[in-house]
Amino acid sequence: MRIRTATQDDRQAILNLLRRARLPVDDVFASDGQTFFLAEKDGQALGCIGLEKLADCALLRSLVVDSSSRKGGLGGQLLHHLKVAATASGIRELWLLTIDADGYFERKGFGRVDREQAPPGLKQSAEFSTLCPASAILMSKAL
């Protein structure tokens, strides 16, 4: 299994993973600020995670692992890969929105934040303003 930076050629595989997990797909690869990482084995996409650099922050996008590969630590490997890449690019804090994975992210060191405290760049993102429901939990982690 390897994790690599995804390309436009991987878009359909990423969309398939996200759709099966019922995660937002409307703006995947919609801006230059988005980078996705793809986990694959023998040419099969097993999981992905995205990073979106915004004006004043960075958003963790859509951590997903295919149901056939869950419980093996792949989500943690993807998250670690993203954090290394984010740190290398100068990002000091990650933000995310989740409907039902807050427990997972709390175990990974993320803390809940009141939505009103979101940075302006995050508030202007499609993920925050339209794609995720207002009930989604906002979380952050310093890197």
Image (cartoon, grey):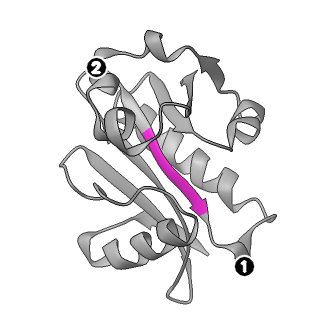
Name the residue located 72 percent from the left edge and 79 percent from the top edge: 68
Q: Mark 1 points at which residue?
A: 68
Q: Is residue 102 above or below residue 44?
A: above
In percent of width and height, residue 72 lies at 79, 65
Residue 135: x and y in percent read 56, 32
Where is residue 84? Give x, y as percent: 50, 41
Q: What residue type is labelled 1?
A: Ser
Which stretch appears magenta? 60-64
Q: As drawn, is 18 to the left or to the right of 70? A: left
Where's residue 41, x and y in %?
Answer: 58, 82
Question: Which of the marked residues, 1 or 2, is nearer the chain's N terminus?
Answer: 2
Give the structural element (helix, strand or loop) at label 1.
helix
Q: Is mark 2 on a helix, strand or loop?
A: loop
Q: In which quarter of the image is the N terminus?
A: bottom right
Q: Quadrant of residue 37?
A: bottom left
Determine whether, in the image, residue 25 is placed left or right of residue 135. Answer: left
Q: Distance between the residues labelled 1 and 2?
A: 36 Å
Residue 141 painted magenta: no
On screen, residue 87 above or below 69: above
Q: Which mark is residue 56?
A: 2
Image quadrant where residue 74 sits: bottom right
